[in-house]
Image (cartoon, rainbow, N blue to C red):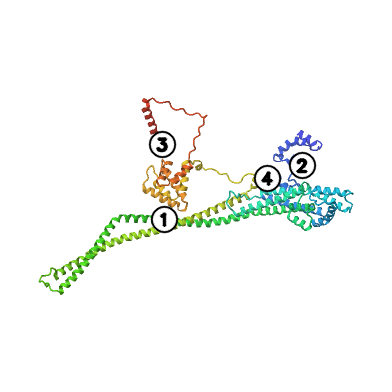
Amino acid sequence: MDTLSAVRDSPRKKLTPRNVMRLRPVLECRMPTLASKAAFILHGDERSAMPGAAGHRPGGLRQLQQSVPPRTMRDVRAAVTKEMKSVTRKVARLEREYYGDKKTVHNEVEKYAYSVKVLMKSLWILDLNKASAIDEMIKQAANPDRYKQDPKHPAALKEVWAKIQTFLPDRVSVLVESCQGMFNNLVRYCVSFYDAEKDGYLETPAHYTEQIAVWKEKAELSIQSARNLYKKFRTSGITASMLSSPVKAFCSRSDIHKLLFLVMFADACTHIRSALSVMTQWLSTDENYAAYVKNDLTELEKLKEEKMKVLREMKQKCHTLTYTQSKLEQDHAKLTHELHAMKEKEQSLRIDEVSLVNALNDMELEMEFKERRRENIKKRPAVSEHGEASVETYETLTSELKSLKERLPMVLRSLAQVRLKLGQVDNKLGQLEKAERDLIATKRELKQAEEDRDLKEQEFVETEEAAQLARKILLCKTANDATEKLYYSVPFGTKTVKTKGETAKGPMARICKLISTKIERDWVQLYLNLPFYPQRGEETIEHDVMELTELGSRASVSWTARQALERWKRYHTRANVEDLRRTLRKIKRSDIIKVIDEGFKSPAKVVDPFELQEEAPPPVRPELVPFYRLIERYDQIRASKAKS
């Protein structure tokens, strides 16, 4: 209490840094959250000069040139827009100071061009497009021996030259550096997040990237021209080709190609305005860029749904045609097997048909012959002219004809039965031919459907990739920390995290993946011929094939093949690469074996001469060789049991 009374009763003293340091512990004890703020331990002058203090808030480029990144792109656009307006006003103000109120470069040329031309003609000077030439002409005009005419012409030249030196380059350089600062910030923050070499084609980002390249080139050219024109004038001189197009056209109309120094200030202002126009367009386009990408993403999502629907229909069609083809192949195989079993029977039926037809023809001929003989006997007497009796009588022929007529229906029935059976064979042949035609047509239709499906799948994948790209660009463009990442040049994108399955992949998994991409529809034959331990029945394996076919009806062939190989590895406890090689060789797919050998060839071992090599075992005495062989055999048996 005594201490506090002494402090309270003591006379008021001016706060000095020493007093502040002495009283700071008390302040920290009372307000620990405010004592750490710099504004509470600075003097009034210093507080008012701090960034963000009242009356001293940074704006324009100063806001972007701080040591901390801007918060959002809105702050960047606001700062650049404010600086553009400021530079535009400064250019207009500078032109009023240079030309005068309501005057332009036309008035400037009209005021000084005549006097300079008269002075050049009097002093026999042909070109004033270099600073040293103007200095030399002013020096000669000051010599009364060289120039004795009207003194107002040298005075006009000195006046315009002094004005040019006053405004160029210092007054203009400030504006040029402001343009350079705005350009640097636009290059840093107004980006498209699109890489034409790595990313797929997307119209809006690709077009915006091309525009950015054009704008950068134009703005850089304008800024460099405004910065370097006066330097070139002071050193090597300038020509009309170094001027901007409007100023060059004005020089051509005014016939001042030898007096280009009169339009240097106008050219610098034109280049500054050109750079401001390009950057304004760039900033405006960047502001609407995210909205355009969002619209593209919405359209791509709708297009993706439509293409997904079409692709689903195409896959369903391919699945139906695949099932139809499988059914036709089964019917074709069944008919082929039946015809093969009926082949010997068909040959015998053909022989029986021929023999029965011949027998029928013979019977018909014999019946016709006997009919005629009976008619002849009926007309003639039974005894001939020589008195000999005929062997054939009317009754005998009638009896034989009756016997033949009784046998005829049996032969006809036998022939009909043979032809009926042959008709069944011919019907099978017709069914086989129809099945072959239908199978060929179905294969052709399936091939066309698969091509259409692959095309639609490719279009769907392209649309999906474009949608993912648009989504990525939109996320990068509208991210809360986008400006911070751009400020610190931090790469955008998410980190790829490897899953446990991906890290555990080995040669077997990579070989299975390679086979699934190359095997195509032969995965069925591969699965049917792969070994299984413990054994799986044929019906179970065929059931697996049918189940995998149904599962892969809405997916690609490579996915189905991969699922088949995964199922084989799950049920075959001794799955290894050699089983795959052997089965691929069995189904005549040596091309895949060649790709496997080329892709997974083990590198040749490089022997290091300084590496410690294992010493060769000492030689074994001949009488101990059989015992060593028994030991090796025992080790092999133990190793095989351990593996099983």
* Residue 291 x %, y %: 63, 55
Q: Amino acid at mark 1?
A: Tyr
| Disc 3: which residue | 643
In space, the residues marked 1 and 2 are separated at their CA atoms by 86 Å
- SS class of the residue under badge 4? loop
Q: Amino acid at mark 3?
A: Lys
Please report whichever mark, 4 or 1, sits nearer to the chain's N-terminal start: 4
| Disc 2: which residue | 46
Drawn side of residue 311 relative to residue 52, left or right: left
Identify the residue at image location x=34%, y=59%. Answer: 429
Q: Quadrant of the C terminus?
A: top left
Q: Would you place residue 638 above or below residue 75 in this image?
A: above
In space, the residues marked 2 and 3 are separated at their CA atoms by 82 Å
The image's mark for residue 69 is 4
Tag 4 and tag 1, C-beta contact below 8 Å: no
- SS class of the residue under badge 3? helix
- SS class of the residue under badge 2? helix
